[in-house]
Amino acid sequence: MRILYGVNGEGMGHATRSEVIIRSLLPEHDVRIMASGAAFHYLDGMFENVEEVFGPSFALEDGQIKRWQSVTGSLSAARRELPENVRRTITETHEWKPEVVVCDFEPLSGLYARWSRTPLVCVDNIHMIDRCIHDAGILEGATEDARLARAVVKAMVPPASDYVIPTFFHPELARDRTWLVPLILRQEIIDARPTRGDHIVVYSGGGDELADALRDSPLPCHVYGMRDGDDVGTTDGAIEYMPRSVDGFLEDLVTSRGVITGGGFSLLGEAVYLGKPVLSVPLKGQFEQVMNARYLAREGFGDCTLTIDNDIVTSFFGRLDEFHETLSGYSQDGNDEAIEVITRKIEAAAEETGRDRARARRQARKAPR
């Protein structure tokens, strides 16, 4: 089967998840990839037939998404890059004639599926926003952000035949043809053997508030993402500013006592799988992160806060044993269940379309001339 796979380039979670799925598909299927931003550079080093496409990005300031700057910046870049990019990519894709499109929140692949009437299967965590029902506790103080997020989700990707959503929490479904599956994890995470060390891993672009809250921490805090240059390797009270390193961060995560980070789905999911309690501080104005963080707290896997100070950090440390106990009940069998569901939905979508096209051809032959 010929499969077009579109991958959003904002953050690395889309890329690492898609890598796992694409590797599972390649032995049986012909897969071509279109990806933007960081996802393109990541996947281009691993697979053949990876096409770079334009993708929108977010503007951030002081830990908050600047909505207007995000829109205007993306539109300005689109005017420069989209027309020629789209014409060439759509033409080459249509000549290849994919039988099904899989989309991890990447808009151009979705648009191609709609234009060409090719079946579309969405595999991403973002559709949790509008495919499930979220109660007042999840929406509290974020109703406007949730409404905007739903509008963005619908604008980014056209309607699909099926939606497969990897997750560690399970709200009630709002729509049919939606499938909640276990987390899709990097092989390095699945292979890891976690131990409970004496340090906290902190992954954040936060500023002085976070540093002030961590400085007097009773546990060492290995901080990633907050400092570069000469600050790397320095200490500030309990804080040690760590160098950027994929392998180093993974080892730190696997041996940590807990995690302090934003509300990004990938790291939250990896921490849950490894049994690491999380204090999640989601980005302001980013409902998807607020949603992830609040469900994490509801599951008892950690805590969620929209502001950070020493009292909140102290409270989190005081509940680490409680969170560890709850996390000990979480389990999943690697990626097997998720991959099985995804493969089944892709193959079913292609078969259904094949039957529809065969039926149309038979009807055309029977039509009077």
Image: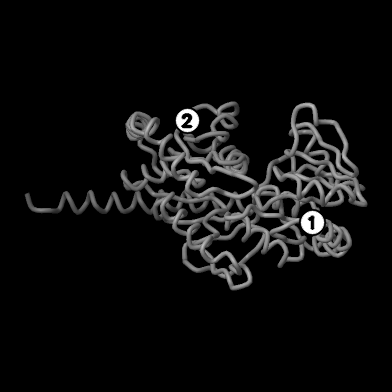
- In the drawing, what numbered circle is on residue 309? 1
**Image position, residue 174 (x, y; %):** 50, 69
- Give the tally of numbered discs: 2
The residue that appears at 55% across and 42% down in the rendered structure is 59
Quarter of the figure with residue 113: top left
In this rendering, the label closer to the viewer, 2 or 1: 1
On screen, residue 36 versus residue 200, left or right, reads left
On screen, residue 17 versus residue 354, left or right, reads right
**Image position, residue 21 (x, y; %):** 58, 43
Amino acid type, label 2: Glu
Q: In this view, does 182 lie above or below 60?
A: below
Closer to the chain start, of discs 2 and 1, is: 2
Q: In this view, does 29 lie above or below 325?
A: above
Within 10 Å of disc 2 (Cα), the crowding (few <14, some 14-19, many 20+) is some
The residue that appears at 39% across and 30% down in the rendered structure is 80
Work out which residue is located at the far left of the displayed protein and give it: 369
Q: Is residue 287 above or below residue 64?
A: below
The residue that appears at 60% across and 41% down in the rendered structure is 11
**Image position, residue 278 (x, y; %):** 77, 55
Q: Is residue 206 above or below residue 315?
A: above
**Image position, residue 162 (x, y; %):** 46, 56
Query: Element under label 2?
Result: strand
Query: Element under label 1?
Result: loop
- In the drawing, what numbered circle is on residue 259? none
Amino acid type, label 1: Asp
The residue that mark 2 highlights is 52
